Amino acid sequence: MSQDKTFVYPKIEDNIEHLRKELGIGVSFDVLLREFKIGRKKVAFVFLDSFSNGEVIIYIMQTLLSVKQEDIVPNPLEKITAKILPYGEITFVDNLEEAVNEVLGGPLIFLIDGEKKIIILDIRQYPGRQPDEPDIEKITRGSRDGFVETMLFNVALIRRRLRDPKLRVEGVTIGSRSLTDIALIYIKDIINPNILEEIRGRLLKIDVDGLPMAEKTVEEFITADFWNPFPKVRYTERPDVAAVHLLEGHVCIVVDTSPSVMIAPVTYFHHVQHAEEFRHNPIVGVYIRWVRLLGIILSVLLVPAWLLIADYSQMLPESFQFIGPKEEFALPLFIQFILANIGLDLLRMASIHTPSPLSTALGLVGALLIGDIAVTVGIFVPEVLLYIGLVAVGIFSTPSWELGLANRLVSLLLLLLTGLFQAYGFAAGLLIVFVRLATTRSFGIPYLWPLLPFDGKALFSVLFRKPVPIKGFRPSFLKTRDTDTSPPGEK
């Protein structure tokens, strides 16, 4: 929301009074005002104590206080910034609204009496943790650093891996009250300009007072498909994964205060790949990928398919007669599975809110005590717990947590339709899910590529992890400027 600018007043007292009202100087204990003189010239610092590097401020003040009058006249602003101020990150603003926003973002503002511009010194020092390995994307071999809640650190982790002069990091600020910093990262001579403009345009259209939930709020604004459970962006907390996608021609969106970086656009198959596959020999990587794909398929189809086969067990060959319960049961099978699925989700949510030393005990209680008693009293047949356990393994083997949750909903839908309408319900459920996937688009990109539209070479790359030395091509659906991975000088 635009507002009229209040340009810097000629007198420093008027500027300080304006800032005092806007920032609550004297009311908010962490907003500090420091007034002093440089060669008989009135000056002032305004900064947030919680974001500032105190040692740097002391060093700057010591340097300025030693300045004599003849050193800064005439043109004090020019002489102070060009010859005296011992700091590199210096910018200027000419209005008080921008000055207020700068203070709230962390930099120090430097006012000089009689000057029409305010000096901005980026001396901020955000509180933050060390870049530890992400819990969700752990690997057995490879780098152990991960994104943190400070945007600048996250950008540095990406730049460390991509020292490309064509790498671009665009900064925008969103939220009229939160003033959240967001970085749009891409490689200029690779990215499709149409995709870049689409994502940038959606970001700039966000009109909200704040982004307290950071990247998730941004995702809902830029995807604008609230009733589609399938994620249209991929989240990662690993800088190496973000760097790989940038080289493919994707855009990374980094939101300050979030350790998760969004990657866009993506397809369904981007969510089923994991860095672990690329940290081993190609043959081992293919094996890991296929096992993971099997786990994902089982998490979606195992229970509905078993329920369907159990309903038609009399039609099975003799060698498959073991499928289906052999004892009497009080509740319909699909009701048992729904209850077991809800119990699994409750156990998962309870483990999140349980202190770490007690989480193992919680798992034992849920899996052994509750499950065993439920079978003993006849609420569940033993096969229900067996297949729900296999489903849980498949869920946790899904690399994308967002896709795992979407698959949970798909599995419940298929389970419900199969329980109510048997084979017709199972077929109808598969059709509904397939149509939903086929009509989903991520920033204009078909979600099921390379299956729909079909691209045999790309589909082969999805199923088989190619050795890195083999010349590769960037995903054709992105329509990148640079189509292959050869160095620019070799083309």
Image: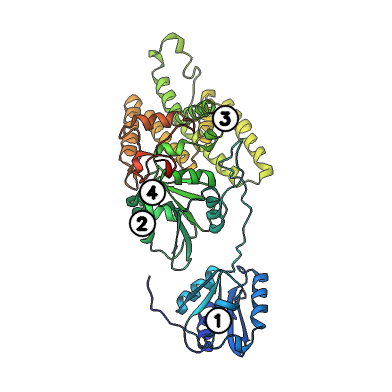
Residue at the spot 51% in from the left edge and 88% down from the top edge: 114
Helix, strand, or loop for circle 2? helix
Residue type of the residue flagged with mark 1 = Lys
Label 2 or label 4, whichever comes before in sequence order: 4
Local crowd at mark 2 within 10 Å, few (<14), some, or many (≥20)? some
Q: Which numbered disc, 3 or 1, marks the residue closer to the eye?
A: 1
Quarter where residue 376 is shown: top right
Which colour style is shown?
Answer: rainbow
**What numbered label is drawn on residue 79?**
1
Secondary structure state at the residue bearing disc 3: helix
Q: Nearer the viewer, residue 461 or 334?
A: 461
- Could you give the CA–CA distance between mark 2 and mark 4, rounded to whole angstroms? 17 Å
The residue indicated by pointer 2 is 202
Q: Position of residue 287 (x, y in %)?
A: 51, 26
Q: Of residues 99 and 490, which is closer to you in this image?
A: 490
Three-letter amino acid code of the residue under disc 2: Arg
Pair 2/4: label in front: 4
Q: Which residue is mark 4?
A: 191
Residue closer to the observer: 352 or 48: 48
The residue indicated by pointer 3 is 374
Q: Residues within 10 Å of mark 1 (few under 14, many from 20)?
A: some
Mark closest to the chain's N terminus, 3 or 4 = 4
Give yes or no for contact between labels 3 and 1 (Cβ–Cβ under 8 Å): no
